[in-house]
Amino acid sequence: MNVLRSERLAAALLLSAAVIGILLANLPIGAALIDAKQAHPIPLGPIDLSVGHMVSDGLLAIFFFIVAVELRRELVIGELNSFSKAVVPAIAALGGVAVPALVFLAFAGGGPTANGWPVPTATDIAFALGVLAMFGRFIPTRVRVFLLALAVLDDLVGILVIAFFFTASVDLAFLGFAAIAVTAFGLTSRLLRPRSPYVLGRRRQWPVIVVLCALAIAAWVFVLLSGVHATIAGVMLGLVMSRRPAGRAVHLLEPWSNGVILPLFAFSSALVVVPQVQPSELDPAFWGILVGLPLGKLVGITVVGGIATMLFSRRKGITPLTWGDLATVGALGGIGFTVALLMNELAFEELPAVIDQGTVAVLLGSGTSIVLSAIVVSIRSRQYRRRGAAEGVGGAFAHPQ
């Protein structure tokens, strides 16, 4: 299972699953696969989800749980635990959200698909780090840390967008029940802290784990029934779980997320028939996503991040990122993939034809960013390798910080 924790392998599986999905959808077997995705198994009471929604609303909540745990860790003990550390990646992340959204609105603003502006604002953490690991052996660690901090903040924006922009109506009663379940989950998780009286008393931990699983399922069900997108349940649980038990849970779940959940979601989302239309007949949203991901992210992160660096990165002993480093992060930030595909489904839920076009645009835009970032990262890595050799240091990520 440890091999599935590899950032490189996770990125490769994600891309492969998406490519296989879009290829199969356009073969004779495609119609049967799409029908299977849209099929509704036997409903469980008020819960009646299609197979596709079981993946995007159910399994993907585990991925968002992992994201939330990482976000909390960065806010508490990581690269976002102080204003001086967080201000530059936060401003760069906002630039990486605002500029792609403006690019999208330049194409689709005022039209019926204008509410799709969040689609090109997403960054796929796993994929971006995977590309950096593949091609950036000699890139300094500070660049990876900056990318991770920016991507985590980017996902936070995505979570807020899902919660507030893609929720039509909310059942406050069910939301209240969800809050109770989440609170109970957080309090119960404290029993598993290393120095808790429960653990020091050498009591069995499996009953607590069973209770936590039951509370997590209850929270997910209540969030789903409340009208809020069910993946928010994973976010809430990740934010309230005690840090040490949460870290162990992530260690256990990460291989399943990388090896099963994310590839399955990519495959399911990519099951679309490529539109047989002329370029002039494509919805403006298609062009907004296609241009917004690679270009909007690159410009937004590089320019806004560069300005923030000049204003705030003057602390003694801190090596600020160069324009080349920021351009590297900006190119990687255009890999939207997982979260962008989810945003696409939510934004155009009432427009199936636009969902298909948007999916193709996300794959093409992210693919363009993959190629661009691979080139940029490779060039920067060679530059740092030569500089490291000249200064008498070497090895992966060995350039002085």
Image (spheres, rainbow, N blue to C red):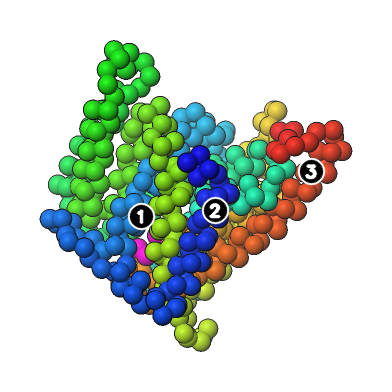
From the viewer's perspective, tell me whether residue 53 is left or right of residue 325. left
Crowding at dot 3, Cα within 10 Å, few <14 / some 14-19 / many 20+, comes out as many
Check disc 3 and report the residue beneath it: 385
Q: Which residues are magenta?
A: 342-346
Q: What amino acid type should be assigned to the residue bearing mark 1? A: Ile
Q: Is residue 343 magenta?
A: yes
What residue is drawn where x is 71% and y is 39%?
Answer: 396
Please, is residue 198 above or below residue 398 in the view? above
Which mark is first along the chain, 3 or 1? Answer: 1
From the viewer's perspective, tell me whether residue 107 is left or right of residue 59. right
Please, is residue 147 above or below residue 379 in the view? above
Counting from the top left corner in percent of width and height, residue 5 is at 51, 42
Between 225 and 285, which is closer to the camera in this rendering? 225
Q: CA distance from mark 1 to mark 2?
A: 24 Å
**SS assignment at label 1:** helix
**Residue found farthest to the left:** 45
- For residue 162, which numbered disc appears in the image? 1
Q: What amino acid type should be assigned to the residue bearing mark 3? A: Arg
Counting from the top left corner in percent of width and height, residue 113 is at 39, 72
Counting from the top left corner in percent of width and height, residue 248 is at 41, 31
What residue is drawn where x is 79% and y is 47%?
Answer: 383
Counting from the top left corner in percent of width and height, residue 216 is at 26, 40
Between 149 and 379, which is closer to the camera in this rendering? 379
Which mark is first along the chain, 2 or 1? Answer: 2
Q: What amino acid type should be assigned to the residue bearing mark 2? A: Ala
**SS assignment at label 3:** helix
Between 360 and 86, which is closer to the camera in this rendering? 360
Q: Is residue 111 magenta?
A: no
Q: CA distance from mark 2 to mark 3?
A: 24 Å
**SS assignment at label 2:** helix
- For residue 11, which numbered disc appears in the image? 2
Q: Nearer the viewer, mark 1 or mark 2?
A: 2
